[in-house]
Image (tube, helix red, strand yellow):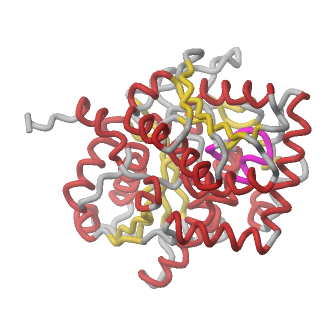
Amino acid sequence: MTALAALIAGKLPDGRGRFGTFGGRFIPETLVPAINRLEAGAKEALADKEWRASLDAELASWVGRPTPLTHAPRLSEAWGADVWLKREDLAHTGAHKINNALGQALLAKRMGATRIIAETGAGQHGVASAAACARVGLPCIVYMGSIDIARQAPNVHRMKLLGAEVRPVESGDKTLRAAIDEALRDWVSDPEGTFYLLGSAVGPHPYPWLVRELQAVLGREARSQMLASAGRLPDVAVACVGGGSNAIGLFHPFVGDTDVALLGIEAGGHGTGLGEHSATIAYGSPGVLHGCRSLLIQDDDGQIIETHSISAGLDYPGVGPEHALLADTARATYEAVTDAEALDALQQCCRLEGILPALESSHAFAGARRYAEKNPGSVILIGCSGRGDKDLPILLEAIDMGGK
């Protein structure tokens, strides 16, 4: 059985946490017991009908699921396609991150954790973690690179209001990669009482699987909603990809639908040279980072290179192992969109649909527009993974508002 067939059959990750040649566990020995407990606890919880029912109830009454599927008539007219938006920007806290944060926070409570740590780039996972921890009654510490703290100040204030302690990270590249490094160091210091609430589909097994399982709710909803509202499945599902949690959540329920193309959009930044982008699949090579084998942006000596994106949530030099497999098997296609293209798509969505998408999501809009140009008349599903309120300070600097 090929790796893709195994994925469609629900047999990946395998017993070693591998998605084909990607994934696995590359962790210090001190974390092995904690990772083993997490895997056992997650499998037990997800198989427990009562626990799943309690999670579903919270997703409905507190998060606001199901989120709407919105037809975009004016974008459809402008692009010459039939455009539909899966509105994760309307979920509680403003992005898809809450699906995973709530699930892991409830799991931490079930497993008897006394504190939760998390990392964040754009701040949405930090906000979601802080909110979820407040909901379940556990203290929360969020690690965030100092560069991201400066460019995502509104989300930092939201985390603090929700009761979280935000710890600035001054080491490394001072962005998401460095925040994950610091969170892992914290976890090593207290692997029994601490629960690491990892925000994306990266890291050592079972995180890529666990995050996928918690985020797949958005793809299952979107699939059902497309059939009900459009009368058919889309020709393509499009999502932005950094670490890849929203994209794998949207893609996974469609993987077996071979007539539905899967298109991941990475951050092309402002160039193709090392340090000018965050397009891991487009320009990366296999390696190990943060406990997982996947595709990475690295030099010839295997040293991780600092990345760039106008969107903090895509500014990461790796990608989830399931995305690496989907790219390797050609089940999904991944393309890069520049900062300028994302900003232009954001403004077009604002003016034509009255929706301000996050800068991360705006990459997906730009990629979908490109797809429509090449495939006129197609039915396009876009994962609107978050809202752009958090990005207003960046937008004010990047976009000429005409002095208004």
Which quadrant of the rendered structure holds the C terminus?
Answer: top left
For residue 332, say whether it is visible: no
Residue 248 location (% of width, % of height): 61, 55
Task: Note whether 15 is above or below 160 in the view shown.
Answer: below
Residue 193 location (% of width, % of height): 81, 38
Number of numbered tags placed on the structure image: 0
Q: Which of 290 and 226 is in front in this view?
A: 290
Q: In which quarter of the image is residue 126?
A: top right
* Residue occupying the point 54% across, 50% down: 131
Q: Nearer the viewer, residue 8 or 85?
A: 85
Q: Quadrant of residue 57?
A: bottom right
Residue 231 location (% of width, % of height): 45, 85
Task: Note whether 277 is above or below 198 in the view shown.
Answer: above
Task: Note whether 131 is above or below 398 in the view shown.
Answer: below
* Residue occupying the point 58% across, 20% down: 305
Which quadrant of the rendered structure holds the N terminus?
Answer: bottom right
* Residue occupying the point 59% across, 16% down: 172
Q: Nearer the viewer, residue 264 or 300?
A: 264
Q: Which of 339 and 91 is in front in this view?
A: 91
Q: Is residue 378 shown left or right of residue 243?
A: left
Residue 209 colored magenta? yes
Which span of residues is magenta-colored? 199-210
The secondary structure making up most of the magenta span is loop
* Residue occupying the point 24% across, 60% down: 354
Residue 83 colored magenta? no
Q: Is residue 163 shown left or right of residue 103?
A: left
